[in-house]
Image: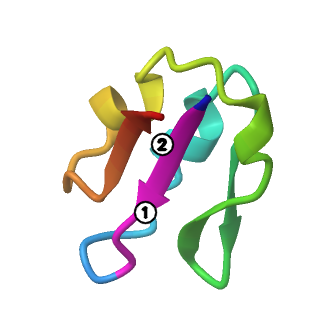
Amino acid sequence: MFVVQVDVDKCEGCGECADNCPASVLEMVDGKAKVVNEEDCLGCETCVSVCPSGAVTLQEV
């Protein structure tokens, strides 16, 4: 299982993480990325790599 976290203070609201996630784990809510389907995370780290502000982190648990 993977745990995706978004630091809302760092999130610039660009939407890259949500747009590029193949499992639709992230959505934009009120101009910030929000984890909505964490159980579907594939652990691919695409969200982490496309985030320009480093707001998205991923850990395997």
Nearer-N-terminus badge (1/2): 1
Residue in the picture at 79% in, 47% down:
37
Viewer-nearest residue: 33 or 39: 39
- Residue 35 lies in the magenta-colored region: no
Answer above or below: position of 60 versus 33.
Answer: above
* Residue most extreme to the left: 53
Identify the residue shown where x is 71% and y is 45%.
38
Q: Amino acid at mark 2?
A: Glu
Task: Tell me the quarter of the picture where residue 49 sits.
Answer: top left
Which residue is denoted by mark 2 in the rendering? Answer: 16
The region drawn magenta spans 2-8
Quarter occupied by the N terminus: top right
Q: Which mark is residue 37?
A: none
Determine the secondary structure under disc 2: helix
Question: Disc 1 residue type?
Answer: Val
Picture quarter containing residue 29? bottom right
Which residue in the protein does label 1 denote?
Answer: 6
